[in-house]
């Protein structure tokens, strides 16, 4: 059975194997690679990250020594899939199957760079696109009052078409509960609405076909001020929501008690992004237009305006934060045209220095980033690493760690104002892929938690998917292959 599965795997994944193996080996050695979703071109070498996270990332994608030493000669990385499969079938590791590190070493070299295939097209801007935690559902939010939930396992059939209530400007964020039963959506309003995503009703028109309950995030401290919610996220247990607002504040909403449980005047400008640091929900990360990332520990909030720590390094406002999920590392996208990697153990108790007032006038909503600002650095930069190449203009563009299951979080990826998706190697800083299709800014993108698939959404209204698939594959054949590949992952890797 293993031999048959291995032969099928080699046949299915064999296309362009040599090309991506070459690129993976270059990345292991610290060379920057940029692949233009069709042809790769080598860039200059980048200094590799010298930090604990570099070692952790390598350990998560380094195969067992017995698999590395299959055959004669000096062991080299990356190990070819043929050698790894042969070693597993001969049980060289003594486990009878791949470990998570073996799996990540094998799968992380196959990037979702082929395509794209069109999933949906709307006449309004796409702002949100996110897979569910298990990858079976996909949520897309559009400026024109629509949210669509697609069933990925059923050929991207629209499972729920939601017409939202009381939209102000656009849908700024959505979040699907961990059990995938409920969806919350926010706009430029203090009211976050919650929808039953698991109901049988396909057409969910607010308060016509279904009730969209409103959760009021305003408090007595707001004194009637009408603010907007930029970011909203479920906690891991699904009992709470955390949100960031144009009122410079962070909010925590208790869903079981159906009331606001915490409000923190957290920053001196808009709070564009918030998230829980890990599954415990004790720590909250926030990012603001004041250029600071802050860490909040709910276990010791004696002074509600006092964070556990501040992280400095961005020169402009922060558009998005994604946590690695370990309560220690996170990344942020900034209007200074960079992604930064942070280790919260480097945070300060207070703001210790200020980069100073910039010598140029600039507003990211309608102006290009000034060329003279590209070489500026923060005098007290506490970040672990900085990644450049994409552009952050016009909208709150998002960035993420790649999936732990298939890549060991070896990459980070982001949308961009120049209508592309960029994938960077976390350790080397290399641009390992640039995906080009869209005609307008790519605000959001999402990598499938298990499959080699990435979906991007753009202001051009297109929702498209990218996969590691053979040239000439049709969407139908690609879907069949994905079903078989999922079976292979679950049973053989």
Image: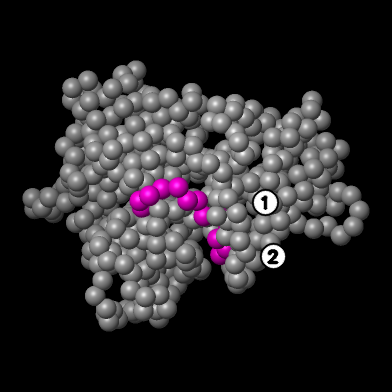
Q: Is residue 247 left or right of residue 294?
A: left
Label 2 sits on a secondary structure element that is loop
**x and y, in percent, of residue 481 in the image:** 62, 30
Read off the magenta span: 426-442
Q: Is residue 431 magenta?
A: yes
Q: Nearer the viewer, mark 2 or mark 1?
A: 1
Asked whether, in this view, residue 210 is left or right of residue 319, the answer is: left
Residue at the image position 50 percent from the left and 34 percent from the top? 134
Quadrant in the rendering for residue 129: top left
Q: Residue 387: image x %, image y %?
A: 49, 65
Residue named by callout 1: 20
Neighbor class of circle 2 (other Cα within 10 Å; few <14, some 14-19, many 20+) is some
Front position in the image: 87 or 26 = 26
Secondary structure beneath label 1: helix
When the figure is inspected, residue 263 is found, relative to residue 307, above or below; the finding is above
Question: Residue under circle 2?
Answer: 29
Left/right placement of residue 356 relative to residue 82 reads left
For the point 34% across and 18% down, the residue is: 200
């Amino acid at each position: 059975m293993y031999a048959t599965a291995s032969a099928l795997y080699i046949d299915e994944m064999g296309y362009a194997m040599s090309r991506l193996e070459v690129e993976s080996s270059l990345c292991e050695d610290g060379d920057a690679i940029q692949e233009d979703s069709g042809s790769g071109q080598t860039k200059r070498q980048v200094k590799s990250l010298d930090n604990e996270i570099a070692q952790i990332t390598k350990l998560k994608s380094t195969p067992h020594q017995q698999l590395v030493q299959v055959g004669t000669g000096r062991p080299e990385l990356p190990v070819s899939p043929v050698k790894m499969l042969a070693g597993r079938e001969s049980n060289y590791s003594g486990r009878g199957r791949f470990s998570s590190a073996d799996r990540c070493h094998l799968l992380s070299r196959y990037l979702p760079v082929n395509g794209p295939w069109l999933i949906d097209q709307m006449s309004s801007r796409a702002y949100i696109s996110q897979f569910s935690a298990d990858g079976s559902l996909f949520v897309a939010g559009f400026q024109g009052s629509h949210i669509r939930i697609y069933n990925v396992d059923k050929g991207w059939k629209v499972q729920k078409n939601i017409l939202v209530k009381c939209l102000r400007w656009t849908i700024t964020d959505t979040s699907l509960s961990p059990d995938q039963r409920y969806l919350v959506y926010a706009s430029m309003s203090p009211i976050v609405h919650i929808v039953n995503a698991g109901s049988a009703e396909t057409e969910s028109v607010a308060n016509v076909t279904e009730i969209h309950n409103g959760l009021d995030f305003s408090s007595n401290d707001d004194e009637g001020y009408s603010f907007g919610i930029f970011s909203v996220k479920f906690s891991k247990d699904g009992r709470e929501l955390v949100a960031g607002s144009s009122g410079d504040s962070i909010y925590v909403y208790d869903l079981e008690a159906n009331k606001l449980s915490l409000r923190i005047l957290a920053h001196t400008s808009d709070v564009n992004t918030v998230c829980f640091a890990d599954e415990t929900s004790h720590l909250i990360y926030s990012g603001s237009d004041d250029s600071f990332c802050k860490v909040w520990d709910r276990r010791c909030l004696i002074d509600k305006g006092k964070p556990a720590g501040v992280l400095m390094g961005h020169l402009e406002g922060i558009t998005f934060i994604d946590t690695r999920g370990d309560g220690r590392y996170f990344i942020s996208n900034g209007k200074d045209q960079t992604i930064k990697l942070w280790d919260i153990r480097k945070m300060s108790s207070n703001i210790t220095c200020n980069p100073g007032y910039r010598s140029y006038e600039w507003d990211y909503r309608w102006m290009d980033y000034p060329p003279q600002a590209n070489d500026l650095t923060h005098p007290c930069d506490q970040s672990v690493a900085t990644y450049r190449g994409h552009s952050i203009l016009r909208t709150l563009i998002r960035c993420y760690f790649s999936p732990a299951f298939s890549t060991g979080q070896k990459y980070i990826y982001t949308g961009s104002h120049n209508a592309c998706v960029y994938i960077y190697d976390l350790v080397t800083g290399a641009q390992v892929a640039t995906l080009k299709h869209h005609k307008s800014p790519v605000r959001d993108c999402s990598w499938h938690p298990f499959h080699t698939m990435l979906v991007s959404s753009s202001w051009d209204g297109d929702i498209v998917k990218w996969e590691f698939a053979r040239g000439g594959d049709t969407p139908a054949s690609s879907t069949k292959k994905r079903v078989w590949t999922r079976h292979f992952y679950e049973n053989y890797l």
